[in-house]
Amino acid sequence: DDSVSSIGSRDFYVRYIESAVIKANNQHTQSSSARCICLSQENNMNILHDLLTARNACETKPFQSIHESNAALLNLVDTLQYRCDSSAREQLELQHLVSQLSASSSGENSNGKKGNAASKAEARMRDKIEKLQEQLNQKLRAEIETSAAALKTATELSQLKDHASAQEATIANLRDVNNRDENTITNLTTQLAEAQNHSRLAEKQYNGLKDMIRTLQDENDELKQTNAQLVERVVSEKEKMVDEINKMNDMVETLQKEVDMLRTLHKQEAQRKEGLDLVGNQRSHIGAGGGSSDRRFGATGVFLPTTPKHVIQAHPIEATSVRYDGTGLDLIATGSSDSTVKVWDTNNGQVKATLRGGSGHPMLGVDLSGGLVVGCGADKTCRVWNIRTQRMIHQLAGHSTKVTCVRLLNNEKGVITGSADRSIKVWDISRSTYKQTTTFRHSSTSNCMDVSLDSLTVFSGHMDGGIRLWDVRSGKRVLDVLSMHEGGVTSVQCHPMNGNQILTNGRDSVLRVVDVRTCTAVQSLGHEDFRTAFNYSSCGISPDGAYALAGSGTTGEVFVWGLTDGKVKKKLKAHNVGVGGVAWGRGGSNGQQVATVDRNGVLMLWA
């Protein structure tokens, strides 16, 4: 029975292994047939061959170990089957022998001795059969255990082969990574070599630059020594010049006192003559009307201008201001956006001096008196020149923005400047070194200013349309006339005959005569063709206080109003573009009194 059960279990185990192998082969066959059907549908045998080759290469590896295990198991099964058949035949022979012995023993029961001998022989045979059966069972069990161990070994071998395949794939990947790393190392080595070459080149350049720097430092040291020597020489020369200038200033002061005395005498004589001849000369010219064509240029007394006697291209671009000499000399100064101030002789219209300011910065205001010219501009400074030498003797710096207007005090020892930084400054220029003495602060940009005849009061016009009066001695604001013009005030002129009145021009295109005692306008002057187009548009008043003058910034016409009735007395048409600057002087030895400048830089001297 044990042998039969052992044989049955062995057969079952063999059939189980065969069925598993057949099932795996069937699945493999089914997947292969499905792939073949798909490929046959594509009608491309070359692609089918390539796919089968690739599939065979990829899919046979996992089944290789199974196939080898299956072959080993089949060999083992054949061996076991052979042994089983041999054991079965031996068992049949033994059973046949046992049956023969049993038959012989039954026939010989009558014979006691022979029966006993047969029984003993049968017993020995049975023992021998049992021992053989037991040995057979042990062999079968050993063979089954050996088969199980072989199967386990085959499985482990398959796993090891799979692991070896995975290790080979990993090794291949690592080889690829190693190759890439070697390529990277090669590239990095090349880059390192290039970087080292660049570094060596940079080091050479650096050494060259160090040598150059040392050379430049040596040159710089030499230049510093030379500069120190030059500075010492300049300081020494400057000290000598200061001593000479101080001596010259003392001499100038002495001469100035003499000149002041002569001017006083000259003014007294002129006032006496004006008092005798003013009314007759003026009214005779007015009554003559257009019959002034034969009048001599430079006629004495106050007269209405009619004809431009000198038309001068004073500047290449717009002229911003014009001003007569305050001491009655035959000189006039013009300022322009070309950064220059020019002084002209009113006798012949020739330029006497060309004075240059800050390069690229327009000149916004000029004044001249007693041999000095001042000009202010957008470079935040004011310059003072000597007309005779045409040299700048002072450059007044202290404003933070452009300087819009400037006036010389009557003694030529002081300058007053107004700026867009909302301050008015008084400067002392009586010595070789200027100094700032007074600063007036206010709330609006100063566009224009004028100084009273005694140089003690400053009248300023502002962008807010107001007029302010300042005391030069105390540095305080004396009066504030608000909103005299709807726009900004562009010009302020003191009345030459009435110290309580001033003439103003504003962006509202109206001229007003203002009484500073009542802070009211006693006269307003205008015309439908008159336009104040610029912040620097000026106005003028005749020396006798009877007429006012201003130019239109659009048409170029120059208007003359009578201050008695406020009517237009003259419209002078000679400029082709807008007029911004006008001046009505006292007239020097030739009597020329009216000058105008326009946006094209043209200066006209009228007679």
Image (spheres, rainbow, N blue to C red):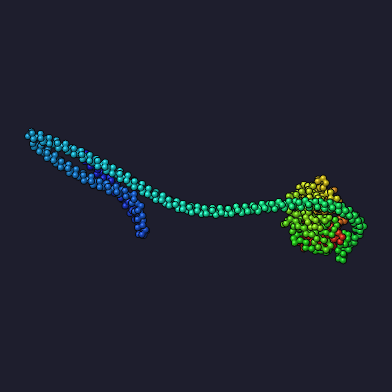
Give residue 311's position: percent from left, percent from top: 80, 64
Residue 531 is at least partly visible in this image: no
Q: Residue at x 86, y 66 (%)?
A: 293
The residue sitting at the right extreme is: 276
Q: Residue at x 27, y 48 (%)?
A: 71
Q: Quadrant of the N terminus?
A: top left
Total marks shown come to 0
Give residue 561's position: percent from left, percent from top: 84, 58
Q: Residue at x 74, y 52 (%)?
A: 233
* 352 relative to 63 in the view: left or right: right
Q: Quadrant of the C terminus?
A: bottom right
Whether 414 is drawn above or below 2: the answer is: below
Residue 167 is at least partly visible in this image: yes
Give residue 53's position: percent from left, percent from top: 35, 55
Which of the two residues, 6 or 127, is positioned nearer the viewer here?
127
Which of the two residues, 331 or 37, is positioned nearer the viewer here?
331
Whether 17 is drawn above or below 345: the answer is: above
Q: Quadrant of residue 496?
A: bottom right
* 360 relative to 517 in the view: left or right: left
Which of the two residues, 559 or 115, is positioned nearer the viewer here?
115
Whether 587 is drawn above or below 171: the answer is: below
Q: Residue at x 90, y 54 (%)?
A: 265
Whether 570 is drawn above or below 229: the answer is: below
Give residue 95's position: percent from left, percent from top: 15, 40
